[in-house]
Image (cartoon, helix red, strand yellow):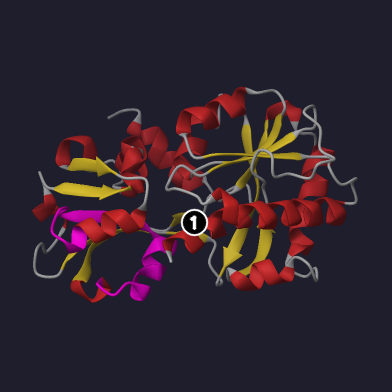
Amino acid sequence: MINKRILAILFVVLLGIPGFADPQATKDAPALVVCYTAGSVNRRQAKKATTSMLTVMERLAGIPIGTYQGKFTSKTQECLDLLKDKGTHFISPTLGFFLKYRKQYHLRPVAFPKVHGRTQDRWYIIVRKGAYTDIQSLKGKTIGGPLVEDAEFLRRIVFKNKIDPAKFFILKHSSRALRALRRLARGKLDAVIVDQQQYDALPSLPFAKDFTVVFKSDPMPVPSILAVGKRTTKKDVRLFTKALSGFCKDPKGKPFCDLFGIDTFVPAKKDVYHQVEALWNAGNKK
């Protein structure tokens, strides 16, 4: 269940995994990088799908197959290292990563997926029924899951600069959301924080009936595909956006979109991140 949701994130951004991209791609080809640091990924499962999707995208853009190489990492530091690499033209990191490095590397949102009619995300805190009533009752308690890794994002965006999670909770990071939820069910964690996709997948768990929500964040933009500084030209962005806009209509792209509930990919509006950027900037004063 969770692995399928994680793979959906990879498929959404149409990127490959090192060694899995089209063999025509060269080491000098511009890179499209996905940084999925909110959980683990089964690389073997992703191999065939990511290769096929990158090929479809290049065909729709009207560029030779192998023009781009795909790269992937699940580690924040590696994501930053790849961003620093001058060969990286597009990158799809977490929202927190974007907010932290957007100015330094001149990151520009290009497009994001509309999934089941949504282009927004929410984060939820899940507890066992009857254990806790609200977020204040969790002060000093253990909260787990992949999403607790970025405490700064939690403070500034999820909790809107009102709670410092590093001081308020005992944070227990795990690489898998499912593992954290199982620990919650066994009473080894007091709470788990999940994103919208992980929350939507909860009903498939046999122990989900024992959970309840004590906190729901305000809506926030879903992670998008970003152009990187002057490396990425207006022509690059135009071709990339063209490929994305037609992907779900393409006979070879549509099955992937149908499988993961992607309606389409939409261009990122300039003001889509204004609210979270204001919250992030306000956090500098705290």
Left or right? Give the position of 247 relative to 277: right
Query: Is residue 180 located in the magenta-colored stretch of the structure?
Result: no
Please indicate whether residue 13 sits to the left or right of residue 206 in the image. Answer: right
Image height check: is 273 above or below 71? below
Residue 53 figure quarter: bottom right
Residue 84 position (above or below residue 234): above
Q: Residue at x 19, y 73 (%)?
A: 210
Q: Residue 148 or 181: which is nearer the viewer?
A: 181
Q: Quadrant of residue 220?
A: bottom left
At x 78%, y 67%, the residue is: 252
Q: Amino acid at mark 1?
A: Ile
- Regarding residue 164, the answer to whether it shows in the image is no
Q: Which residue is mark 1?
A: 6
Q: Nearer the viewer, residue 202 or 223?
A: 202
Quarter holding residue 215: bottom left
Q: Position of residue 65 (x, y in %)?
A: 86, 47
47 lies left or right of 138: right
Q: Which residues are magenta?
A: 184-207
Which part of the image, by quadrant, shows the C terminus? top left
